[in-house]
């Protein structure tokens, strides 16, 4: 039997509607809009698309969007000065510096300069630490979006076996922390893991965040498992096409015959990332103004 499709696009739309309603309530209480600032350095085409899309969706949710574009030649001092300026700007609740940065800029130094209470990407070590010890903070958007999809599909995750493939700071590690906090038994697999198919086969929940097209195969999956595919990979173009197909890290066609539920690519995890960013920015706004926000509202 074919797996159920987990519709991240529809879930993300529902989340954006909730954010919009709470953004309007925020404006009524605070007398200003919640504000998200996005900083882009250079002209990387993919980053330009993301930044444009983030700005549009921020405004569509009734929040203020502030976009800052610096030339590829911007110095570290200039970028850090801009971040400091945004840290001190009361109309800015969330700050996101679009990564990757040009090679001459130190990403860790830039992230460390963002006020942790405006770090809506959740990349600051303070927020990584808060996640690790279970204190409220900001959680990276992609793994938090994956967790929302999992809880929506499975309800209580307690006691389930979860395998996260990938150990990056932005997806794999925070994903593992979130699943531990939900009382899953978590294994983090990575490029040095021995017998990955056998490890994955134990899992009730598989989260693939590797960056290798269609790596996870049907015979790795325990029948009925829930599979979350974070990967976004573009295949080489077929003859006569100018763009290749987008695929995930999971062999979707094969795995959907074995899994209980699976996220498609595109239309699964991808749309969740920006919706969760907007959610995080709104949470930041409520916190920055000292306003109550029902933790179950979003
Ligand atoms: P990354 O390159 O930082 O990390 C990849 C991880 O995969 C590493 O920890 C590595 O150990 C592991 N790995 C590599 N080869 C492996 C192998 N053969 N077997 C097992 N593990 C292996 O990547 P990332 O930033 O975590 O992103 C992962 C994927 O998710 C990419 O395709 C990226 O485009 C995608 N992504 C999607 C979103 C989204 O919004 N949907 C957001 C972030 C990343």
Image (tube, helix red, strand yellow):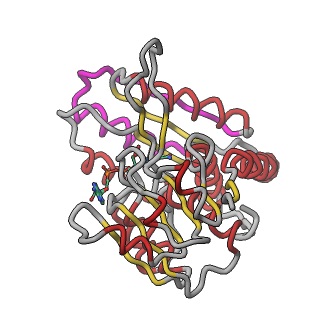
Residue at 76%, 64% in the rendered image: 297
Quadrant for the C terminus, please: bottom right
Residue 295 picture location, percent across and down: 70, 70
Residue 270 as seen in the image, left or right of residue 233: right
76 relative to 159, above or below = above
Viewer-proximal residue among 19 and 28: 19
Viewer-proximal residue among 120 and 292: 120
For residue 102, which quarter of the picture? top left
Residue 155 picture location, percent across and down: 70, 75
Residue at 66%, 45% in the rendered image: 34
265 part of magenta stretch:
no
The single residue placed furthest to the bottom in the displayed view is 159
Quadrant for the N terminus, please: bottom right
The single residue placed furthest to the top in the displayed view is 240
Residue 131 picture location, percent across and down: 45, 72
Is residue 218 at all visible to an observer of this figure? yes
Residue at 70%, 63% in the rendered image: 291
The single residue placed furthest to the left in the displayed view is 104
Viewer-proximal residue among 58 and 140: 140
Look at the image and give the residue range highlighted in magenta: 63-90
Residue 213 as seen in the image, left or right of residue 3: left
130 relative to 140, above or below = below
Residue 190 as seen in the image, left or right of residue 135: left
Residue at 36%, 53% in the rendered image: 210
Is residue 27 at all visible to an observer of this figure? no
Residue 82 picture location, percent across and down: 37, 35
77 part of magenta stretch:
yes
Please state the total of marks drawn on the protein image: 0
For residue 83, which quarter of the picture? top left
């Amino acid at each position: 039997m074919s797996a159920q499709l987990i519709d991240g696009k529809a879930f993300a739309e529902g989340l954006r509607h909730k954010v919009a309603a709470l953004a309007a309530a925020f404006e009524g209480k605070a007398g200003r809009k919640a504000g998200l600032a996005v900083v882009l350095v250079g002209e990387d085409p993919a980053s330009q698309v993301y930044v444009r899309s983030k700005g549009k969706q921020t405004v569509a949710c009734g929040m203020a969007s502030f976009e800052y574009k610096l030339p590829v030649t911007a110095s570290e001092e200039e970028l850090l000065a801009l971040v400091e300026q945004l840290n001190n700007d009361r109309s800015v609740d969330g700050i996101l510096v679009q990564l990757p940065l040009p090679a001459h800029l130190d990403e860790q130094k830039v992230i460390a300069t963002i006020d942790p209470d405006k770090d809506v990407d959740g990349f600051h070590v303070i927020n990584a630490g808060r996640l690790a010890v279970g204190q409220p903070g900001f959680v990276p958007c992609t793994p938090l979006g994956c967790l929302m999809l999992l809880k929506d599909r499975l309800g209580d995750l307690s006691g389930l076996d979860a395998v996260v493939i990938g150990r990056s700071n932005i997806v794999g590690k925070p994903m593992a922390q979130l699943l531990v906090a939900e009382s899953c038994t978590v294994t983090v697999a990575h490029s040095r893991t021995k017998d990955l198919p056998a490890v994955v086969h134990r899992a009730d929940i598989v989260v693939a965040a590797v960056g290798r097209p269609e790596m996870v195969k049907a015979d790795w999956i325990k029948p009925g498992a829930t599979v979350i595919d974070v990967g976004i990979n573009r295949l080489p173009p077929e003859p006569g096409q100018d763009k290749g197909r987008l695929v995930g890290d999971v062999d979707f066609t094969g795995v959907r015959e074995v899994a209980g539920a699976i996220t498609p690519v595109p239309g699964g995890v991808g749309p969740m990332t920006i919706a969760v960013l907007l959610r995080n920015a709104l949470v930041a706004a409520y916190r920055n103004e000292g306003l109550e926000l029902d933790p179950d509202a979003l």
